[in-house]
Image: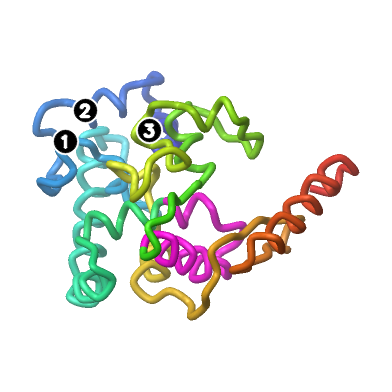
Amino acid sequence: AQVYTAVDRALGLPAGAARKAATAPAALPLPAEARGNPEGYLFPATYPVLSTTAPEGLLRFMVDTAGKRFGTPEIAEGARSHGMSVYETVIAASIVQAEADNPDDMAKVARVVHNRLARGMALQMDSTLNYALGRSTVDTTHEDTRSTSPYNTYARKGLPPTPIGNPGDQALEAVVRPADGDWLYFVTVAPGDTRFTADYASHRANVAEFNANRRAGKS
């Protein structure tokens, strides 16, 4: 949604024009796995915009850029090494992009995603649930986790069916070359302080610290 808003603003178009252009039949050169859904393939970068630029042209340029970035032998080999397709790698990268507090944490977040998938654990990522519910919050309730959405990674194992955003180069690189570690959990207890652990008790203590910081207005 943010991408469409940015395109509308850059081109001086009424709200919703870019989204309409993106969802027109055969509007964009998307891979077959995307099934016409451009999420994940509107690559974040700086693009030249002229007074004559149409939303279809700009969105197509974004998708073409994504195709070039995602279609390298390095990405394909990196995906295979983790038992993923390139499309699944883009899905995982979109989660990493949404979850990482700062770019330096992306490789660790990616490792958590890989470790949980390898163990058959639900990812339990707030970002995917937020995508399903059309919001942005860290206040996930028990009722939220009962959502029947396929993007509810608390209730459903594996990756969600599509990307939840448009990942950049660093998030994609993190998924194909994650950090080494046995982490299964992470939480950002304060800005710039994300704690990674393989121990659930330690994670609960970190979450308690996060909640205390929020009550004290520190996060």
Task: State the residue position of label 2.
Answer: 23
Task: State the residue position of label 1.
Answer: 36
Q: Earlier in the sequence, mark 3 or mark 1?
A: 3
- Could you tell me which residue is drawn at 44 percent across and 61 percent down? 116
Disc 2: CA contacts within 10 A as few (<14), some (14-19) or many (>=20)? few
Q: Is residue 35 above or below residue 18?
A: below
- Could you tell me which residue is drawn at 53 percent across and 69 percent down? 108
Rendered image coloring scheme? rainbow
- Could you tell me if the residues under marks 3 and 1 are in contact, i.e. CB atoms within 8 Å? no
Q: Position of residue 144 (x, y in %)?
A: 54, 28
Q: Tell me which segment is drawn in magenta.
A: 95-117
- Quarter of the image containing the N terminus? top left
Report the amino acid beneath label 3: Tyr
Q: Nearer the viewer, residue 54 or 105?
A: 105
State which mark lies toward you, 3 or 2. Answer: 2
Report the amino acid beneath label 2: Thr
